[in-house]
Amino acid sequence: MVKSVYVASLASSMVVNLLFMIINIYVGGEWSLSWSSKAEAEAEAVSEIACSGHRRAYLDGLVGDGNEPVCECNTCYTGPNCSHFIPHCTADADSGDPLFLEPFWMQHSTSSALVVSGWHRMSYSFNDNTLISQHLESLIRKLHAFVGTAVTQDRYIVFGAGSTQVLRAAAYALSLANSSSSHSPTRVVASVPYYVLYKQQVEYFNSEKFKYEGDAHTWRNRSESDASTNVIEFVTSPNNPDGLLNKAVLHGPNAKTIYDRAYYWPHFTPIPAPADEDLMVFTLSKLTGHAGSRFGWAVVKDETVFNKMVLHMQVNSIGVSKDTQLRAFKLLKAILEEGTQIFDFAYQTMKSKWERLATTLSLSNRFSLQKINPQYCFFYNKVRESSPAYAWVKCEKEEDKGCYAVLKAATIIGRKGNVFGSEDNYVRLSLVRSQDDLDILIQRLQKLVSEEDGAISM
């Protein structure tokens, strides 16, 4: 009886305290913030700093003499508020920094804003003793179902620090799966032109488990005839750099495939069907533009491969930052709540960029672009063209074999074709950077094309 009275008294006290807390927070018909008010005020103050539309100031960014945040300007802009244009600066079309999505999030600041307490998720693990947020995993499955980009039913999901770490974990797991049949290192291949990270990781880590062997096509007959050769093929689809929806070249019991689906979103390509491969890798950076958050994931069919990837993540980094997972959760939640808005914005932005570039180079007899056939897109329920992240530019003339040098002389920096295992008469130009970057790139290309002999005039 005494115990019952004590419990009732305690419950009553908790209710009264909760009511006082609510009354203290809700004052004068408005909600009054407590611990988060200073953080909110700091974030609002930084967001109001005017940078003339040529980038932003950041709370953790550059500071002025008075220790206050100052503008960090886009390429070719300078000055206290980024208003001064540098006329002869170099057009930066090298990196895949997805700044083209920054305006979308500025328009959706309320739904994407995040305030984090100082005591948020201080433990290594979540309450279920795992390293991944179950709520975030659920959102990822819902997002794939909504957009139609991947089959996730009866599949496992692994988190990593960007697709970079996930790709490494996938190669590690598949090399162990192959090791029972051979003591020689697993060969790693990709079709030319390939994303250079696959080669860089194998060579940098210099593991006895792997050996990079270059173009997948050279291994087609060999891997199918040599029972002792274990091969992992990276398939980038859409491909970086040319945007093509690649498929695996190698098949057979000793051939394992990792599908890099970083760009498999309506921003960049028609979605002809949900991807349904054994191991598929995605990244937040090319979905939302938040490359700096470093969050990627894999959708895995085989439980053994999944467990090996999880083990790799545990040993390598003890999982992904809880702060990163929280931000990814907030962003994906905002995307799903707002329907097709981010995809509509991103597709129209990339479509416009691609059309401007294609129109400019269509007047040239010196440069050409990759050809990508239109396909039916189930997300938009229509046949549509691709709007690729990169232009794969070819210098057509014999004397322009060093295409990178040709463009550099015109103050345009791209990425050399040989970086992707291709010839030097190719250069990759990035279209995912800011609108300022694209405008400067188009200006430089228009000038270059206008100086050609026999160029078509508009």
Image: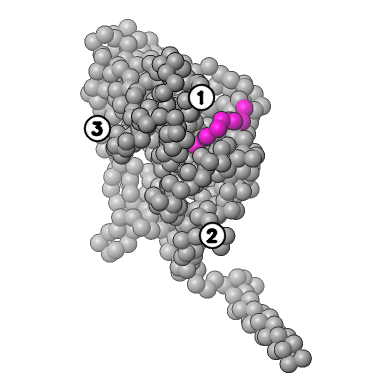
Give, as a three-letter code, the residue at label 2: Asn
Disc 3/disc 1 C-alpha distance (Å): 56 Å
Residue 12 in the image: above or below residue 86: below
Q: Which residues are magenta?
A: 273-281
Q: Residue at x 64, y 79 (%)?
A: 18
Placement of 121 over or under 19, stated as above or below: above
Q: Relative to 200, does residue 310 appear above or below in the rendering?
A: below
Label drawn at residue 129: 2
Q: Nearer the viewer, residue 230 or 14?
A: 230
Where residue 316 sits: x, y (%)? 39, 49
Front-most of residues 73 and 269: 269
Q: Amino acid at mark 1?
A: Pro
Could you tell me the amino acid type at mark 3?
Answer: His
Question: Label 1: which residue?
Answer: 253
* Residue 270 falls in image quadrant: top right
Q: Position of residue 223 (x, y in %)?
A: 43, 19
Looking at the rendered image, the disc whose residue lies closer to the viewer, 3 or 1, is: 1
